Amino acid sequence: MSEADRIEGEWQLIWLHCGNLSNRPEPVAVPPEDDPTMLFIKGGRYRMYCGIRVIVDLPCRINADKNPKEIDLLPSDDPSWPAAWRKDDICGVYQVEGDKLTIHFGWNRPRDFAKNPAVVSGLYGYRRATRLGG
């Protein structure tokens, strides 16, 4: 498996920190285990669901050769998305450690995975999803 392939798959959101969005450095509540927020990264797509509701479905670009590794959500011309998402890439960095995935997104590319409540960014923690019987 290549380094870029390690991010692909199904992930469950387990924690989230928002800087300068919620004005608090504490974790934001995530949905319960029986209705989890799931992330699917595959074939250049970044899809996030809460239950059956699609939250994000955007093309993405992954560069596993950078340090830290980069992930960018690409603009969508879908008029239902916020105007900023239709104009600029949402830049991020990521790391995969075992069954854990950490992604840090910002309008300017984050340099690390540190929480910074003064910067508009989102720091997400996931664990690789497991299927029953598999």
Image: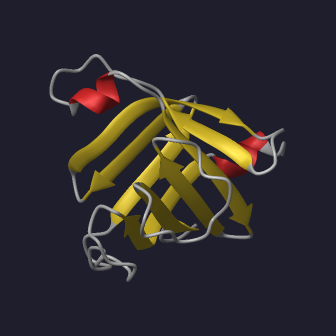
Farthest-out residue, left? 80
Which quadrant: the C terminus?
Answer: bottom right
Query: Quarter-wise, where is residue 82 in the image?
Result: top left
Q: In the visual, does 56 lie left or right of 127?
A: left
Q: Which of the pair 95/32 is nearer the observer?
A: 95
Give the number of marks: 0
Farthest-out residue, top? 77
Query: Quarter-wise, where is residue 86 in the image?
Result: top left
The residue located at (40%, 55%) in the rendering is: 120
The residue located at (30%, 52%) in the rendering is: 49
The percent coordinates of residue 3 (x first, y second) are 82, 46
Q: Which of the pair 90/13 is nearer the observer?
A: 90
The percent coordinates of residue 132 (x first, y second) are 47, 71
Q: Which of the pair 9/121 is nearer the observer?
A: 121
Residue 43 position (above or below residue 128): above
The percent coordinates of residue 73 (x first, y second) are 48, 34
The residue located at (26%, 58%) in the rendering is: 50
Query: Quarter-wise, where is residue 117 in the image?
Result: bottom left
The residue located at (34%, 63%) in the rendering is: 20
Farthest-out residue, front? 118
Farthest-out residue, bottom? 26
Residue 99 position (above or below residue 48): below
The percent coordinates of residue 32 (x first, y second) are 27, 79
Type of colouring: secondary structure
Q: In the visual, does 131 lie left or right of 100?
A: left
Q: In the visual, does 105 lie left or right of 113?
A: left
